[in-house]
Every structure is written in C-alpha cells, then in structure tokens.
Image: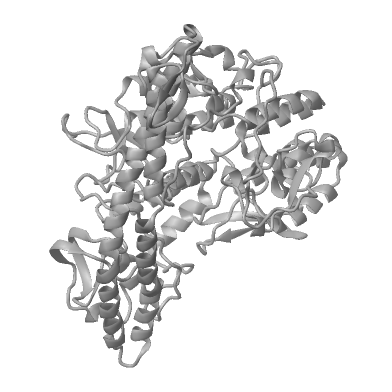
Amino acid sequence: MPKGPQQHAYTTRGSISDTNAHSVGDSQREEGSITPKIAHSTVNNDVTIMNESFQLMRLSSCSKAAPLSGEGEDDAEKTAHPSQKSSGSAPIIPKKEPLPTQQPPGVRPSTSADSATYSRQRQAVFKECISTNVTFAATWYTHPQAPKFLICPYCYETHILNSRFAAQFHGLFHDDGEARACRFSSSRIKESLWKLAISSGSLNDVVKYMALRPSIPNCVGQAGAKGNAGIQWYRTRKNDIPAIVVCQACYEDHILSYPAFGEEHFEPSTIQHPADQTWSCDIAVPYISREYAVRAATNNWGSFVESVPVRMSMQPCPGEKSVYPDGKGKKWFTPTNGPQGLLICLACYCDYILLTGQDAKWRDAGDNLVNLFGVSVFCCFGAQFNLRALAARTLDTNDHTLFWRGIDIVAREPTCKSRMQGATWYTLKSSPDGFEICKACYVTIAESMGVSHHFVPKAGVPANGSITCNFNPVIARFGLYMKHFLELVYTQDPTSLEKFIKVYAFMPPCRRDTGLENASWFGWNECTICPECYHEFIRGTALADAMAPQSVQVKGAVMCEMYSPRMRQLYLAAGATDPPDPKPLLEYSKQRRAVWAETMPRARQILSNIKIKMLQQDMAMNNSMFYTWSGNLFQNTLPLEQTYNNAAVGPGYYNHMQIKGAEYGRQATAIGSEITGSPAYVADELERRWRAVE
C-alpha cells in the first residue's frame, strides 16, 4: 500500500470473507489521535532485527491457506550475556579487503577441522527448502539457460532428481561465503509451472521464468521501498481495489501462480511512484496472500475485492507497545477454550488465524475489556517474539497440535524477557558456556523449527538466577544468533552455532561512539579498540603485534575508535607502509576525540531531555484519549443538553471528563512544540559536526 500524504483508508463494510466465523466489518476505521504526536526521528533496532529474523526464518509471509471447507491450516538497549555488562547494538562491520597476513572472507584454510566441516555440509540431508540467504557451504543446482536461478539440494532432490529433467540441471559445491537462496520455492514454480512441465514434458516455460526472475528485485515486504528503488508495481484492473499495490517479484511469484486469473485482474501500474514516498507490497501481508490463493483457486474475484480492502484499512498490530484496549477500531480475540488472558489484535487474527481452519477455536474477546484487563493490554503475537514465530511457522507447517501445545506452555511459563527468574532452561547437547534458551522459546521456536532434538535441559541453573534467553530480541547480536540457528535448521548440524557461541557469548558488542565500562581493550592510548573490532578486523594484521595494550582491563568508560570505516581505512594505510607506521592514524584519532568531546556529550544531554518530554507527551496523549473517551461514553449513556465553557480549552463540553481530555490534549500539543524547537536544532548541528569526522 502506498504510504504518503495521499493515502486514504477504506470504509468498506462487511466481513473479511464469506467463510469467516467473526464479522470484522466494524473494525476498519482507525482511532483518531487527540493531537498529532511530534517526535525526534528515531529507529527501533529491536523491531528491525526481529523483522529481519522473521524473514530469515521464512516467517514474514505465507501463501498457504486452508480449504474453504475449513479443514486443516526507542532504540532499546541490547543486553549481553548476564555475566557481561549491558551494552548497545552490535555495529555494522564494513566489508574490508584482506591484508596479506589475513585470510580472505571467501577462502577457507585447508585444515582437517575445516575439511570435516565441508564433509558434513556435502553429506547434509536438508529437511526443507533454503528459501532465504545463507552463507554456509552447500551444493547449488542450476540450469544452463538460467545460471543465476539457484536451486537448493532439498528442492532438487524433492522435485527434480526423479523427474525426466534431472539431467538438464547441474550441481556445484560452493564454500566461498557468498549469500545464496533457493528460488524454486515460489508458488509460481511449485503450483503452476513445474506441474505443467511434468504433464507436458516441456521445460520451456520453467526455463523462461528461471531466466527472468533473478533480474527482478526481491520483495522487501511490509517495510516498503522508496520510489527510487527501481521496483515495478502492479495494480488491479478497472481500479477494483484502488489502494492495493503488488511488486513485480510477487506478481511473478504469486499472482501468476494462477496465470489466467492474475492476468485478467492485474496490470502494470500507470501511477508514478514518487521518489520520497514509501510503497509496500500488499501481497506481503499474510492474510492477503492466503486470500488471493483461495479466491484464485475458485475464480472468485468478487470475494477478493470485498475482503482485501477491509484488511488493508485495519490498524496495524501495536507490536511491543501496550495500548488502551477499548475504543473504535479496536477488536481483540482470545482462544475459545483458553488459556485465559491471551489476547491478539484484529490484524494478527486475520494474518495468522483466518483461512487456516482454526478460526472456530478463537472468539471475539468482547467490549469493555478495561474491566477485565485494565487500561493497558498488548497483542501476544506482536509483543512476544516466540509466539509470533510460532504463529508464522504454523502457517508454513499446518502443525496446529504443536501450535496449541506452544500456546499452553507459554501461558504457564514465565514470559521470555530480559533477566528472567524461575524459568526452565535448555541448551545445546554440547552445553556451551553462555548459551541458554527458556522453555517457552524451546517449545515455540526450537520444536516448531524441527531442531528440538539438538537441545537438552540445562542443569545447574540457580532457581533465583537472573538470565536472559538467547532467543529474546534484547540479547546482544540477536540477529546473528538467528542466522546461525537458521543454519542449524537447514543442515541439522549445530557446529556453526556452537562455534559462534564459543567466540561471542562473553564478548561485549562494540558500542561505537558510546563508552564501554570495565572491559578489555586493545590498541594504543590514543586509539583504543574494543575486543569485537580487534577480533573481526585487527587480529592477524601487520600492526596487531605492535600495539602496546593487549587486552588490558580498564575500569572507566572507553570509546572504541575502530568501528569507523574512515579509521579502518587509515589503519589499513598505516599497515601498508614499509615499515608499518601508526603515527598518522594516532594523530587523526586524537583530533577525532577532540571533536567528539566538543559535540556529543552536549548533544546527548539535549536528546535525553527531548526523550523525557516525549514520555511526558505520551502520557498526556494517553490521558487525553482516556478522559475524552470516558466523557463521550458518559454523554452517550446519559445525554445532557447543557454544555460547559473552560477558559483554557473553550466551550462545547458536556462534562468534566471531556474538559479534562481537552486539557491533556492541549498539554500534549504544547510539549510537542517544545520538542521541535531550538534544542532539537542545536542537537542536530552538534551531531552533524561529529559525523563529519567520525
């Protein structure tokens, strides 16, 4: 859906589909805010990492659906391992050219251990399609006329090996560390083209698709893309659904899975995508993808046109944020037979429950939830990573028995969060130090992904211990843990995850330009280097042995200098001289520190004050919505003709609650004006000075 100033919400009435158990037609209008919220631009790294992990685990979307009969289907601070001090997000490590003393990233040293690893990879029996980018060694198959269309061992052995076309595909073992993903898993291949090829004896249409598809940018999901991303968009013919947009990748992969139906109802968009606007592909919404598959299979375009606008107009899942449960546009669902107290929002109900055959096991939670749950509730699928992972994985496996088992255990176990107590813990069979996952994540993630047999209960954990689960998004390097866990899922070999844990479990992430306290440091007094940057960039280079401090423990806060691409370039240049000379690097590092001291402490103090005001604004807005809603409810229940005047907010209020709501709204507006005033401009200017030399 296009996201921009011209975006409009639909107000189509009716249920999501004629097969739904619950009507959601009254839930499509979004609740209006009392006053626009003004905030300093921030990025939620936790949400970003979580979404990337969903993509890695094939959890971002799914086109499978149950038959119509109903049968079957703020920058949060990362926490390191409990024995570490809490630290910030791991830095993005720029790709570097190797020095003569270093091994290039794609070249493995020929040791017996590595040979054993390659042997395991060659002999690995893959249990599912490698549909996401992976870098581990594996054999990839291609067709001579489509060399860029990669096919993983699982898809080759499952679909091609025993077919008449097997001799036309050739495998090549890759161990160069480059990211690769299988493209054979698209519904276009499996539901249409391959079946046609088997029945007709001709591979022409398959090869034509395989030659075209690598040239098309992949779908970026619900995050969307700007107009300058070079994506071709498709819309419905005759403007049947005006707001829907489908990227070319999803058009080729999903829409044309039913070619006659897709070509009849979709066409290339004639509306230019403005460079500053973000458009997101609507087929990436799990419900819309399933709805299309069901309606295309039955040639029922009318139901698709009726249902999709209702889903598109719903409020998005609040995610980790707790919200006031009642009000227009808010509808919650709960399991019919328990566990009690579990709520999911309307959007998640549509995306993970409808058209799976499980909607009869859920019911509308009803109105006036404030009396049952208080003024603050959250969506369990949005707020708890493990439950969302389980729900999305179930779309892929249709294993609803495991789904309900996971739901029941999560309800009985402590919630997976930072520094848990009283949980049951699991670890890998090798019991590596610094790695444990809670029982809730063991059931919802390890079991659902088919690798629970690699885990065992962890002994010796103190009952009153404070531990953070390694599958919780707050953990340091969460995305990397998920990457290596994904390799375990595909290869059924825990070696990669075990090696990663051994190196990084107790290594604090680089804090970039934020000081890290009580850590070991490398480098020189003028240029300090954290353990992570030393391990990933410095070790084995010409200047590594010339550094005076080698893993020296420092009590105070110290800032790493070597996360910066500019500093890394200077380091490489210093090591390339004969003999290696660090003096230019150290001189620049001293100048860099001086600029930081003049700018960032003050800028961060200003931003800290702004964040406090944002919290105050949040509180004022929530109070405004609560009192306004309560006052409107009172007036609708016991109407009064007389209105009241207030000197601060003016006339036209029927009761004191409406006046109170207006006062809080006025307060929120005033705070917003303070946030966007001169302090924010000063902070931006100071930060700009620092970034110029960073």
Residue 15 vertical position relative to residue 282 in the rendered view, above or below: above
Q: Is residue 339 in sight in this rendering?
A: yes
Please state the horizontal and vertical placement of residue 519, each as a whole percent of the image. 18, 60
* Residue at image point 59% right, 25% down: 350
Please state the horizontal and vertical placement of residue 420, each as a whole percent of the image. 25, 33
Q: Is residue 475 in sight in this rendering?
A: no
Residue 310 vertical position relative to residue 284 in the rendered view, above or below: above
* Residue at image point 17% right, 74% down: 549
Query: For this rendering, which residue is in front, 409 or 361?
Result: 361
Quadrant for residue 19, please give it.
top right
Looking at the image, the residue that sits furthest to the top is 638
Left or right: 472 as drawn, with respect to 298: left
Please state the horizontal and vertical placement of residue 238, each as a whole percent of the image. 85, 37
Query: For this rendering, which residue is in front, 170 or 412?
Result: 412
Left or right: 293 as drawn, with respect to 27: right
Looking at the image, the residue that sits furthest to the left is 555
Count of numbered circles on the image: 0
Query: For this rendering, which residue is in front, 34 or 205?
Result: 34
